[in-house]
């Protein structure tokens, strides 16, 4: 049912189908198996304070970001990247990718982040003719808004890592750790800001930039519609390149700051090194160091005769001492107690030091002289000091320390009650001794007679001191017993659990058929008894060797399956196939070295990495940055927002001829075919030029007869608007609407008739002169009619 694996780096814990991983600080950082309930979710969740990655059979693949907006996100998490569990479509918000490359469907490179290349219509081609057309300006405007968005994201990230807690000033003398935040900036964002505003200032001569930040561009400005001359093509390209270089430079500095602020194995931290030898702290003068590792525990060493010599350390592999023996050289100790192996006290600094032979010699004659009173007073002061210390210890252990625990047991309760009784006896004997000795110390200069002045005897006098001494030693013994009962004793059996310096923690099952050992040698070792309880034969089935490699026997590790009672194999860990996650509605997510991340829905591909290394997806939806549900096309269930492409074909890939739309560069075509070069173009809308003048729109209707005939042309140039048709014989029929007054509108037919036909009336009108033709006749009306 329950399994926990722990080392110095963290804990892996399973409770049934619920798996959890904790880091070295005890924080939960990952869930696997049954990761959530109501409804049950089986998968893999990994998270920190900012980001959460989820892979489960209900939501599929999801990356969340921590959100403070509990109205829109009640659970405190906002989706950033996810696959729709219904059809496997991949969605994203605020996507930033490093070293990304984007190509179009014909293989042309659009974006190469590694080499700082971005083709926004290709800057070199845009400015090749030293001109910016209206269409090229629209491309640049789109890029400027992208740059503005990336500029703000870069500043936000830079502000987070600009100052490091590593540079904070700590108050090492304070009781609790306190520090003053650092005022040291690891880098500056000013070069990026300067490059950004320099770019916007430069580009404003071609585009109407209302405000550089926040960026506001007047797209409807006359500047946008005008073709602008570029005096220096190199300067135009350099402005963009300078900004991209500064952005990359700042990103590298942010990564350096993250490395600077992080903990790196083997790196020096003010003469402290953390690495394969554990922790080593070296004093600045190079004479002393502290070593903390699994071999020596904590060792304090001194540099003597060109080598490090242990001063305080735990003996490991020493022929003179048993392993685990604490050895100290040049030791100075306070309140030291030394016992034999049998428990006899050899030396106890806290013991009550009292010489009864001196007391007996003082009261031998029933008289206490002034000098003898000084001896007794010194003895009384000494025992009073030790009495007060012992009384405080008893009170603290019987109240605060006893109550500061989650559970207790009979032995500890009994030891506590006996300690309370011994403490009461200590108080009574001390108070009795104090009352008895008060008349003696009332006047230190006079002699006191035990019988006449105290109305007592030598036996009673001696008994008062002896009763306190016995009560003091009895209280110390009860305190030691309480400490032994309230603390863990090495080698003692606690309900089949034994902890000692040699084996660490050993837990034996009640029937003696299984045993688990936890120590620095094996980490966790689980053994099976192949013998009997009386004559055990232990065989290791789960253990770590001396190199830290983990071994398990009688345990399937090639394919680890996490099962759902309804779904079956919800998660499969396989040495070849990697991780496979099955959803409730035919979804399947695979993670391995061959496919990276592959997502299928009902055995149909949705997202995968092809064998040529390209990332591919079907039914891809780019979600708009707006609130509310996504509105899809009712006929195709499709939606794409803010699309900028080099080429577009709306064609079915079934190898049959279809009518389709083809958009590329500066034209739109209506074609018939299979998306091949030989397809027939039946309509073409494009921008063209004559004599290197400004481009103008032109429509070409029909596929033609191959020699320039049977085509219709509509075009708008700087000279006018023209509608033209050329028949198979090459004869022109046209309507010309010129910009000039003469021949303003001209209709002509080459080798053909012009017929104006109406069944009601045809009217020609010019000023006050009219010619009207009706089925009834022709009427001419004019101030003057000349017939020649």
Image (cartoon, rainbow, N blue to C red):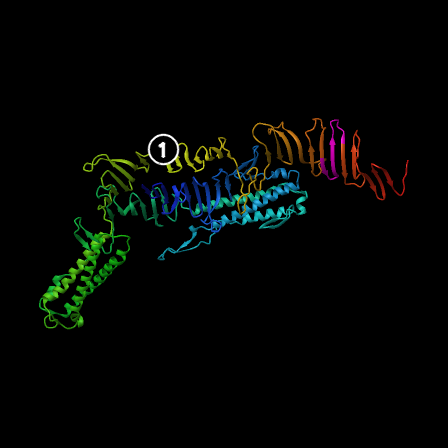
Looking at the figure, which quarter contains the C terminus?
Answer: top right
Q: Is residue 566 visible?
A: yes
Give the image location of residue 480, x and y in percent: 21, 54
Q: Is residue 751 magenta?
A: no
Q: What span is in magenta?
A: 714-732
Taking depth in this image into account, of 702 and 189 the one nearest to the observer is 702
Relative side of 228 to 612, left or right: right
SS class of the residue under badge 1?
Answer: loop
Residue that sits furthest to the front in the current view: 776
Looking at the figure, which quarter contains the N terminus?
Answer: top left
The total number of labels drawn is 1
Q: Which residue is mark 1?
A: 558
Give the image location of residue 332, x and y in percent: 25, 54
Residue that sits furthest to the left in the current view: 365
Give the image location of residue 147, x and y in percent: 56, 45
Give the image location of residue 749, x and y in percent: 78, 32
Relative side of 718 to 415, left or right: right
When the figure is inspected, residue 256 is found, relative to residue 754, above or below; the finding is below
Q: Principal SS element in the magenta part? A: strand
Q: Is residue 715 magenta?
A: yes
When the figure is inspected, residue 80 is found, relative to residue 470, above or below; the finding is above
- Residue depicted at 39% across the width and 33% down the height: 574
- Residue depicted at 49% across the width and 45% down the height: 253
Q: Is residue 569 visible?
A: no
User: What is the crowding at mark 1: few (fewer than 14 residues within 10 Å), some, or many (at least 20)?
Assistant: few
When the figure is inspected, residue 62 is found, relative to residue 558, above or below; the finding is below
Taking depth in this image into account, of 336 and 75 the one nearest to the observer is 75
Give the quarter of the image for residue 472: bottom left
Taking depth in this image into account, of 696 and 33 the one nearest to the observer is 33
């Amino acid at each position: 049912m329950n399994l926990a694996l722990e080392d110095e780096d963290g804990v892996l814990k399973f409770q049934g189908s619920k798996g959890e991983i904790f880091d070295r600080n005890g924080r939960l950082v990952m869930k696997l198996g049954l990761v959530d309930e109501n409804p049950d979710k089986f998968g893999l969740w990994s998270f920190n304070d900012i980001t959460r990655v989820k892979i489960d059979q209900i939501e599929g693949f999801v990356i969340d970001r921590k959100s403070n907006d509990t109205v829109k996100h009640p659970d405190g998490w906002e989706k950033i990247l996810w696959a729709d569990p219904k059809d496997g479509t991949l969605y994203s918000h605020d996507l930033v990718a490093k070293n990304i490359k984007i190509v179009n469907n014909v293989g042309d490179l659009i974006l190469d982040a590694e080499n700082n290349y971005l083709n926004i219509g290709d800057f070199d081609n845009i400015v090749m003719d030293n001109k910016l057309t209206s269409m090229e300006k629209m491309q640049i405007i789109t890029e400027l808004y992208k740059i503005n968005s990336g500029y703000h994201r870069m500043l936000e990230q830079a502000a987070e890592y600009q100052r490091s807690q590593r540079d904070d000033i700590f108050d090492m003398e304070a009781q609790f750790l306190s520090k003053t935040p650092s005022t040291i900036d690891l880098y500056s964002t000013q070069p990026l800001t300067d490059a950004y505003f320099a770019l916007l200032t430069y580009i404003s001569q071609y585009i109407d930039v209302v405000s550089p930040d926040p960026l506001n561009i007047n797209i409807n400005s006359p500047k946008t519609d005008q073709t602008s001359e570029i005096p220096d093509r190199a300067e135009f390209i350099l402005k963009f390149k300078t900004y991209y270089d500064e952005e990359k430079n700042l990103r590298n500095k942010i990564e350096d700051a993250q490395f600077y602020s992080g903990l790196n194995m083997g790196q020096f931290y003010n003469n402290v090194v953390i690495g394969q030898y554990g922790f080593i702290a070296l004093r600045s003068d190079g004479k002393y160091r502290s070593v903390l590792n699994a071999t020596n525990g904590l060792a304090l060493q001194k540099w003597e005769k060109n080598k490090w010599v242990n001063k305080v350390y735990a003996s490991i592999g020493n022929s003179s001492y048993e392993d685990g023996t604490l050895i100290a050289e040049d030791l100075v100790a306070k309140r030291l107690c030394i016992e034999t192996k049998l428990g006899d006290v050899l030396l106890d600094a806290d013991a009550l030091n009292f010489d009864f032979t001196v007391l007996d010699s003082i009261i031998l004659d029933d008289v206490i002289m002034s000098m003898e009173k000084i001896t007794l007073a010194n003895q009384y002061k000494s025992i009073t000091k030790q009495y007060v210390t012992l009384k405080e210890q008893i009170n603290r252990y019987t109240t605060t320390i006893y109550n500061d625990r989650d559970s207790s047991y009979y032995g500890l309760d009994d030891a506590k009650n006996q300690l309370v009784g011994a403490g009461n006896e200590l108080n009574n004997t001390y108070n009795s001794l104090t009352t008895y000795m008060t008349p003696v110390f009332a006047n230190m200069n006079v002699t006191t007679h035990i019988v006449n002045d105290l109305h007592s005897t030598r036996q009673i006098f001696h008994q008062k001191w002896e009763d306190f001494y016995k009560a003091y030693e009895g209280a110390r013994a009860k305190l030691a017993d309480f400490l032994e009962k309230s603390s863990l004793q090495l080698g003692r059996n606690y309900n089949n659990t034994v902890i000692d310096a040699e084996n660490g923690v050993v837990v034996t099952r009640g029937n003696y058929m299984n045993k688990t050992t936890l120590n620095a040698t094996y980490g966790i070792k689980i053994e099976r008894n192949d013998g009997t309880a009386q004559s055990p034969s232990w065989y290791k089935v789960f253990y770590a060797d001396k190199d830290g490699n983990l071994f398990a026997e009688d345990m399937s590790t090639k394919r680890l399956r996490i099962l759902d009672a309804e779904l079956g194999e919800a998660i499969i860990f396989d040495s070849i196939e990697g991780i496979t996650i099955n959803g409730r509605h035919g979804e399947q997510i695979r993670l391995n070295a061959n496919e990276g991340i592959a997502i299928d829905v009902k055995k149909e591909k949705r997202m995968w990495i092809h064998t040529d290394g390209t990332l591919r997806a079907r039914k891809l939806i780019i979600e708009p940055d707006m609130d509310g549900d996504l509105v899809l096309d009712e006929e195709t269930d499709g939606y794409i927002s803010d699309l900028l492409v080099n080429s577009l074909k709306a064609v079915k890939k079934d190898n049959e001829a279809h009518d389709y739309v083809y958009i590329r560069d500066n034209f739109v075509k209506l074609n018939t075919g299979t998306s091949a070069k030989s397809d027939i173009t039946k309509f073409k809308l494009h921008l063209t030029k004559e004599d290197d003048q400004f481009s103008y729109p032109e429509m070409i209707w029909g596929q033609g007869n191959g020699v320039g005939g049977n085509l219709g042309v509509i075009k708008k140039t700087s000279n006018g608007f023209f509608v033209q048709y050329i028949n198979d014989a090459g004869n022109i029929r046209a309507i010309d609407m010129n910009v000039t007054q003469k021949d303003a509108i001209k209709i002509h037919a080459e080798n053909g008739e012009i017929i104006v036909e109406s069944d009601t009336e045809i009217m020609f009108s010019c000023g006050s002169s009219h010619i009207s033709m009706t089925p009834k006749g022709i009427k001419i009306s004019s101030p003057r009619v000349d017939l020649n």
